[in-house]
Every structure is written in structure tokens, then in C-alpha cells.
Amino acid sequence: MILKPQDLVVLLKMVAVGQEKWSYTTISVSLSMSASEVHAGIRRALAARLAVHLGDRIIPALNGLEEFIIHGLRYVFVPDRGEMTRGMPTAHAGPPLAGMLVAATDPAPVWPDPEGEVRGESFSPLYKSVPQAAKSDHRLYELLVLVDAIRGGRSREREIAIRELSKRLRGFDGDQP
């Protein structure tokens, strides 16, 4: 069993959803993935113990998820950086980090998106549909930005992102085992 980057996107969507009821179909539509991709991702997350069954529900295993994101993510899902492009700000340039850090002179990291309003350095998203999914879910967008700062940011950016991500994971509305 090998985790795929979209598995993390599905788990972060589950965190963003909180206590709201979800189905494979609702998650797949909101993430522009097929229901079978979502189902396979949740199956892999369960096998990796990043998600757990709680009665008839499946919820993220927050402690394991946090540990994986903080200590393993940047070694497993290394971002590709590229040319200057139009896109959606991420890592230290996206919310909530943009307001917490002094603006760098380097180009902002962006997920390539032809509808993007920021010109910056291409930064590969965890999954191809991330920009589209983030546009319709601000909570998910912030979680993805924090994850990108951890996987591709400098030491100070990672430190702040870890602190902010931990706050958001602790604010998850689900009942934890």
C-alpha cells in the first residue's frame, strides 16, 4: 500500500468538512475527483492509520495525520517548482500565512491556474484539481496552503505553518477516539 498525494487532499477535505455529513460523491464533486479515487484514497488512509472508523463514520486520525504532515510529508511529496506563471498563491504567499510573514523579494509560489490573479513561481499542488477545489472551500484552501508551506517552505515558514495547522486540526469538530 502506497499513499498518494490525493489521499492527503481527501483527508484535508474531511477536516475542512468537520461534523457535516459527507459521502464519497460529495467529496469527489468538491475535489473534482472520481468517487472511486476518493474511495481508494480513504481505503489507503485507513490502511495507513491516517483515518479511522468511528461507529458508522470514517474520520481523520488527527494525531497520526498531524505527525505525518509535520515529519514525513516534505520527504514524500516534494513539490516541483518551475517557471513564472499565473496562478493561485500557496505556501507563505497564501492565506493565512501571507498576513503573518514579511513579504519576501522572491516570487510568490503559486499553483498554476489560468484564472489565477497572481504571477509567481510555479509550485506543484498535491493533486491537479487542488486550485479548483480551494476556490470553493476557504477552509480547505488554508489547510492546503499550510501543508504546502510545510512541504516546500523555509524553516521559519514551516515553523509557523506547523503551529497554524496544529490549531486547525485541534479545532476539528469530529469526535476523536
Image: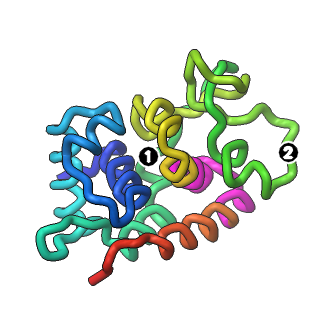
Q: Measured from the top left, where is residue 129 in percent x and y? A: 41, 31
In the picture shown, does residue 30 fall above or below 59? above
Closer to the camera, 118 or 85?
Answer: 118
Q: Which residue carries the number 2 mark?
A: 103
Element at badge 1? Answer: loop
**Of the residues under marks 1 and 2, which one precedes in the sequence?**
1
Residue 132 left/right relative to 123: left
Residues packed near mark 1 inside 10 Å, few (<14), some (14 to 19) or many (20 plus) = some
Residue at (48, 69) in percent of width and height: 169
Residue at (66, 36) in percent of width and height: 89
Instruction: Please state which amino acid type lies under the numbered disc 1.
Output: Phe
Can residue 100 be seen here? The reply is yes
Q: Measured from the top left, where is residue 31 in percent x and y? A: 35, 37
Instruction: Please state which amino acid type lies under the numbered disc 2.
Output: Ala
In the picture shown, does residue 5 fall above or below 56? above
Element at badge 2? Answer: loop
| Residue 147 part of the magenta segment | yes
Q: Which residue carries the number 1 mark?
A: 77
Residue 50 left/right relative to 18: left
Specify the segment rendered in magenta.
144-159
Closer to the camera, 6 or 132?
Answer: 132
